[in-house]
Image: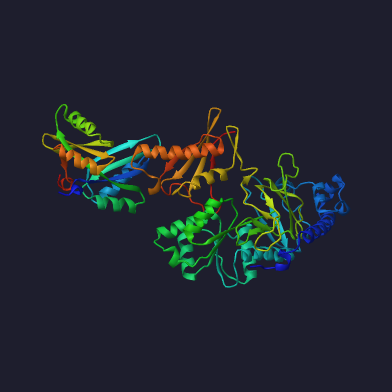
Amino acid sequence: MFFEKNKETMSRKDIENLQTELLKEKIEYAYKNVPFYKQKFDEYGINKNSINSIEDIRKLPFTTKNDFRDNYPFGLFAADMKKIVRIHSSSGTTGKPTVVGYTKNDIETWSSLVARIAAAAGVSDEDIIHIAFGYGLFTGGFGLHYGLEKIGAAIVPASSGNTKKQIMLMKDYGATVLVCTPSYALHIAEVARREGLDIETDLKLKVGMFGAEPWSNKMRQKIEEALNIKAYDNYGLSEVMGPGVAGECETQDGMHISEDHFIAEIINPDTELPVKDGEYGELVITPLTKEALPVFRYRTRDITKLTKEPCVCGRTSARMYKPIGRTDDMLIIRGVNVFPSQIEEVLFSIDGISPHYQIILERAGALDSATILVEANANLFFDEMKKQRQFLDKINYELKTTLGLDVAVKLVEPHSIERSEGKAKRIIDKREM
Amino acid sequence: MDINDYKITQISVFIENKKGRFYNVTKTLKESKVNIRAMSLADTMDFGILRFVMDKPKDAYDSLIEKDFIVKKNDVLAIAIKDESGGLSELLKIISDLDLNIEYMYTFVNALENKAVMLFKFEDIDLAIEKLLDENIELLKEEFFKRV
């Protein structure tokens, strides 16, 4: 299903022409309204005439999270507070939060973008949508809420917390769509089962729209089986808008980027040069239609790849694949680069493994060690020590072949890994650097 | 004779090698009024496998599952041997001569007068029952564990 079909099926040439025009306008707009960009553009000798084709975006400087911090709280805003109608911000666990603002038009744009990804996932005004994202400064809750309202669906803004009650609401109100983080979706399935619910008959869920944390295709399978739904991924980040930047269609083969609103590039994070088509690198996004907060070439730190091949759904937009990691969540263990998603792929390829795991990093002397905690269950428990060891050795071997690194695998009791209602805590780094 | 009469239900429990884990298992068994007849613990640095023979294996199994323990049921054989020097050795020689594979074994103390009881997990329990009975080895039945 489409929300704005004519825009979602523009020819590649029209998309690029539109992007070039919007980019020129945005450069002029930011130059006039944001001292930070005025100074940057002067320094780089950039004005709207520097842009003649979409490739010319490479002349522009990058914007990073630090630029947001340096201009905390409102230094990057281009609109007066009078025009701003909403402020969101990051949790700021590592310092000052990242603050973003929206004008009335921005909220409209954002809602339409979310409506697009919802329609692409098959959601319509017939649906009852249970949103278990936290409502608050985090863009997930309100972002999805406004977009889904725009589609005309009935929304249950459950927010986060109290899983048993959430399940009761889903059952009693007949939710057909679940919106939350993928790890929380699994937690819901587990609690529902423990409470004695029959997922197929007690719940009416058809579709899940999950985002806000990286998850693998194997995890998707687990969620789809556990909740008897189709699980769709979507992508966004508050610095460039929020959720709704990209989302999967029913083909589930990459997330369609709304390119009439964003320019997406993939660069090598070290050389900062574009990678070859289809290669993995860091995703860089330039929003083209934001009024409150124009941003250029934002470094998302997400590692992914793009394809511009036409999709069977009819959309012409570039698709981004599930990020396989972040430039900043890449773990360096004994000098080997490891993305937690690689570990997840290996674990989830083993039959019967529980979806709850945690990676513990420790340092003894100068040597790092990684231990992966996996929750045991009847499928993974053998009454014989020999078979139990063989099973653990097999996981260890698979990890070693994939990662090129020896990691210990430890079975722990069920429910001993902390469940999260927001983003799952997969990594416990106890190393003192 | 039904060879199934000689199959003794054994319950195995996965426990993490952490303080209080073993106690939690025994507490659950106590609450369901199950009496432990024989047990063994195989342990590693990280985890252990507890194996029990009990008077009420079904109650034990259900109560442990209820408490979210990871539990497996298996059949083992209970073999009575002379409680004297060489008793076990004699039995093991027979088992070895019969070419039966033992996966693990443990003892059941204070069972019978002048006799010791050993619990065996064989690779092929049916074959083991048949061959050991042929050798006139004394196999105990499950009722025995309900009585003692």
Image coordinates of residue A63 in percent, x first then y, are 75, 48
Specify the quadrant that holds the C terminus of chain A. top right
Image coordinates of residue A138 in percent, x first then y, are 62, 56
Question: Is B13 positioned to the left or the right of A315 in the image?
Answer: left
Q: Which of A367 and A272 is in front in this view?
A: A272
Question: Is A118 positioned to the left or the right of A68 in the image?
Answer: left
Q: Taking the image as drawn, is residue A142 in sight?
A: no
Image coordinates of residue A293 in percent, x first then y, are 75, 56
Q: Which residue lies furthest to the left in this view?
A: B113
Quarter where residue A209 is shown? bottom right
Image coordinates of residue A86 in percent, x first then y, are 69, 62
Q: Residue at coordinates 62% horizontally, 51% vertically from top-left?
A: A322
Q: Which of A251 and A239 is in front in this view?
A: A251
Q: How many marks?
A: 0
Q: Nearer the viewer, residue A126 or A104?
A: A126
What colour scheme governs how the chains and residues are painted in the rendered image of this protein?
Answer: rainbow
Specify the quadrant that holds the N terminus of chain A. bottom right
Quarter where residue A104 is shown? bottom right
Q: Taking the image as drawn, is residue A414 in sight?
A: yes
Question: Is A209 positioned to the left or the right of A107 in the image?
Answer: left
